[in-house]
Image: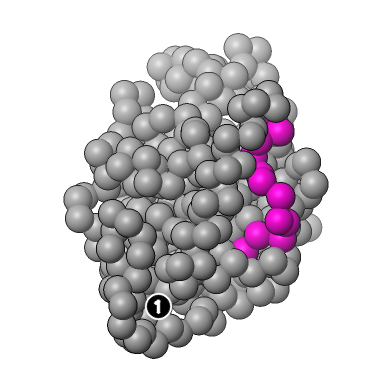
């Protein structure tokens, strides 16, 4: 059988002669404007050389992104789809630099919801095609965290908006920083403190924390004196969780239980992961797990690496293989796993004094996750 495409290594600046003839100079300038090497850039070229696409993808994920196409666009996209199916991927995305709505629709791509905020130099459109015949995930809004430390707060806000719980204010910097202030262990949000903040903010939400260690977490990079007072705050968060009826499950959350919670029980799970596999640096980071497809969990990552050519298109509706997510959610030191599961509303929510964190003195019916 004649191959329908060829994969060509991407070497910015050292463009093949056929590509120089095919691609406008401004397109090649855009392609070479950033160092895309962390995300395995490659060119997929049609067998007759009439069309080509520049592809990238985060490591340890189950998608590929069309950065741009040149030449015969339908042929180039067909070649990419063939490549993606043969790689066993869950999804192909397409950044809207030069793609037309007509071309994307004809190729079976659906438009992505535009992010709530968008910075300069980011695409004004994005598209997705799920490769499984039963694919398709309910799409939450996308919001990029505005600081280096508010990922936990942002994932909670997105989860609650997606679930229809609503927020006092629209998702934005004020809501982001306000919730972070309620949840922070200075500056990170540890699992129990984040779970408590979610319950206080949304009293009808069913919240369960998964944390398979009794030790303080996310403190190893600090000096002993800095660790000490943050450990006191983490202990206080556990006391608050007990008073508010937020269970803290000390058993390790399994990948099977995570998938079941999202897929069957309609939970939104805030999951603590290391960015070592996806970005190359071992930093703890909160992501939102909100959908499942065969072999992968779909997440929202509130941060993306513009220096490596990432945009909101990468971080939104991002499928991560089960094994990859399982590995990256074991956090060092100690290889613990931390998560906050947010389920359907309580049938009879506890009355909570937000200022003091105390239950009202009345009987309540608590429904566990």
The x, y position of residue 67, in whole percent, is 50, 35
| Camera sees residue 94 | no
Could you tell me which residue is drawn at 76 percent across and 42 percent down?
A: 332
180 or 143: nearer the eye?
180
Name the side, left or right, on which 356 lies relative to 264.
Answer: left
Name the side, left or right, on which 145 lies relative to 362.
Answer: right
In the depicted structure, whether residue 180 falls above or below residue 43 = below
In the depicted structure, whether residue 281 falls above or below residue 344 = above
Residue 163 placement: quadrant: bottom left
Residue under label 1, please give it: 344
Could you tell me which residue is drawn at 53 percent across and 22 percent down?
A: 307
The range drawn in magenta is: 210-221
Could you tell me which residue is drawn at 51 percent across and 67 percent down?
A: 242
Name the side, left or right, on which 329 lies relative to 188.
Answer: right
Q: Quadrant of the N terminus?
A: bottom right
Q: Residue furthest top?
A: 13
Could you tell me which residue is drawn at 37 percent across and 32 percent down?
A: 146
Residue 49 placement: quadrant: top right
Name the side, left or right, on which 60 lies relative to 120.
Answer: right
356 or 102: nearer the eye?
356
The x, y position of residue 340, in whole percent, is 53, 61
Q: Is residue 144 magenta?
A: no
Task: Find numbered disc 1 in the image and state the secondary structure of the residue it sits on.
Answer: loop
Count of numbered badges drawn on the protein:
1
The x, y position of residue 77, in whole percent, is 52, 48
228 or 79: nearer the eye?
228
The x, y position of residue 58, in whole percent, is 62, 40
Identify the main secondary structure in magenta: loop
In the depicted structure, whether residue 54 falls above or below residue 155 = above
Mark 1 surroundings within 10 Å by alpha-carbon count, few (fewer than 14), some (14 through 19), many (20 or more): some
Q: Is residue 214 magenta?
A: yes
| Camera sees residue 200 | yes
């Amino acid at each position: 059988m004649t191959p329908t495409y060829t994969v060509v290594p991407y070497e910015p600046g050292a463009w093949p002669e056929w590509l120089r003839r095919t691609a406008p100079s401004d397109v090649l300038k855009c392609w070479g404007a950033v160092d895309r090497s962390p995300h395995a850039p490659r060119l997929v070229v049609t067998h007759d050389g009439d069309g080509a696409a520049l592809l990238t993808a985060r490591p340890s994920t189950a998608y590929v992104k069309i950065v741009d196409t040149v030449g015969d666009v339908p042929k180039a996209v067909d070649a990419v789809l063939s490549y993606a199916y043969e790689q066993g991927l869950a999804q192909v995305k397409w950044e809207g630099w030069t793609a037309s709505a007509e071309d994307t629709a004809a190729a079976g791509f659906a438009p992505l919801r535009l992010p709530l905020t968008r910075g300069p130099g980011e695409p004004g459109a994005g598209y997705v095609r799920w490769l499984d015949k039963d694919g398709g995930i309910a799409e939450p809004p996308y919001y990029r965290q505005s600081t280096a430390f508010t990922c936990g707060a942002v994932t909670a806000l997105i989860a609650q908006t997606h679930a229809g719980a609503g927020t006092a204010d629209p998702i934005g910097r004020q809501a982001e920083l306000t919730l972070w202030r309620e949840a922070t262990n200075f500056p990170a949000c540890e699992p129990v403190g984040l779970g408590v903040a979610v319950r206080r903010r949304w009293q009808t939400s069913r919240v369960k924390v998964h944390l398979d260690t009794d030790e303080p977490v996310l403190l190893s990079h600090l000096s002993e004196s800095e660790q000490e007072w943050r450990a006191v705050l983490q202990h206080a968060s556990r006391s608050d969780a007990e008073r508010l009826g937020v269970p803290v499950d000390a058993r390790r959350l399994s990948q099977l239980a995570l998938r079941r919670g999202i897929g069957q029980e309609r939970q939104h799970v805030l999951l603590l992961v290391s960015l070592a596999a996806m970005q190359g640096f071992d930093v703890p980071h909160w992501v939102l797990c909100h959908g499942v497809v065969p072999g992968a969990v779909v997440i929202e990552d509130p941060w993306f690496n513009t220096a490596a050519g990432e945009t909101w298109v990468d971080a939104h509706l991002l499928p991560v293989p089960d094994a990859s997510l399982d590995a990256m959610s074991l956090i060092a030191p100690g290889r613990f796993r931390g998560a906050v599961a947010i389920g359907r509303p309580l049938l009879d929510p506890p009355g909570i004094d937000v200022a003091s964190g105390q239950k009202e003195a009345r009987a309540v019916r608590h429904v566990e996750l």
